Structures are given as structure tokens and as C-alpha cells.
Image (cartoon, helix red, strand yellow):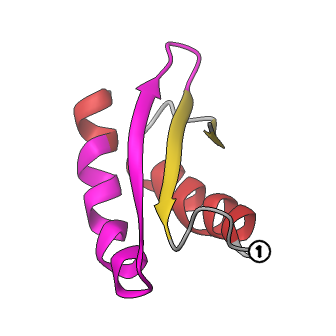
Amino acid sequence: MKEEVKKAIDKIRPNLQADGGDVELIDVGDDGVVKVKLVGACHGCPMAQMTLKNGIEKLLKQEVPGVHSVVSV
């Protein structure tokens, strides 16, 4: 599942990089929880939580069966 998550994150990465940010994959748990770290302009951005839930989490749930949630660490 981790490789599938990496591939899905690579699809959204250009959008984040266009705004000066990025996302790092930290871990994919057996429970379907994906841990990521927002970096660059995304780190500390007031819209980071919305990007995390409405962007990254939504895409990962669509692309990778078994993903239940995405959390920032």
C-alpha cells in the first residue's frame, strides 16, 4: 500500500510545489492512517488543514483502497 500512496502523492505534489510547498510521506499504518509532513510554504499556512483533508486525503482515499485518513505530523 505504501507504494500506491507514494504514487498518489506524486500526482498532487506539483500543485503544492506551485505554491512553494510540498508534502513528505512519513508512514502508512496497517490501520489505513497515512502520516505526512507538510513542508515549505504549506508548513504553517492557515489553509494547510484544508489542503490536507480536502486535497491530499480526498485524493488518497480515491486512489488507494484501504486509506482511512491522513494526518499531519
Q: Position of residue 27 (x, y in %)?
A: 44, 26
In the image: residue 2, left or right of residue 27: left
In the image: residue 68, left or right of residue 26: right
Q: Position of residue 10 (x, y in %)?
A: 26, 59
**Location of residue 36 with respect to 26 vertically, above or below:** below
Which of the pair 2/46 is nearer the observer? 46
Image quadrant assignment for residue 58: bottom right
Q: Considering the image in quadrants, where does the C terminus appear?
A: top right
Amino acid beneath label 1: Pro
**Location of residue 59 with respect to 7 vertically, above or below:** below
Q: Position of residue 47 (x, y in %)?
A: 72, 75
Name the residue located 39 percent from the left edge and 40 percent from the top edge: 25
Q: Which residue is mark 1?
A: 46
Q: Position of residue 24 (x, y in %)?
A: 38, 47
Name the residue located 72 percent from the left edge and 69 percent from the top edge: 50
In the image: residue 46, left or right of residue 65: right
Name the residue located 42 percent from the left edge and 56 percent from the top edge: 23
**Location of residue 4 with respect to 27 vertically, above or below:** below
Image quadrant assignment for residue 15: bottom left
Magenta range is: 6-32
Which of the pair 54/24 is nearer the observer? 24
Residue 68 located within the stretch drawn in magenta: no
Residue 28 located within the stretch drawn in magenta: yes
Which of the pair 26/40 is nearer the observer? 40
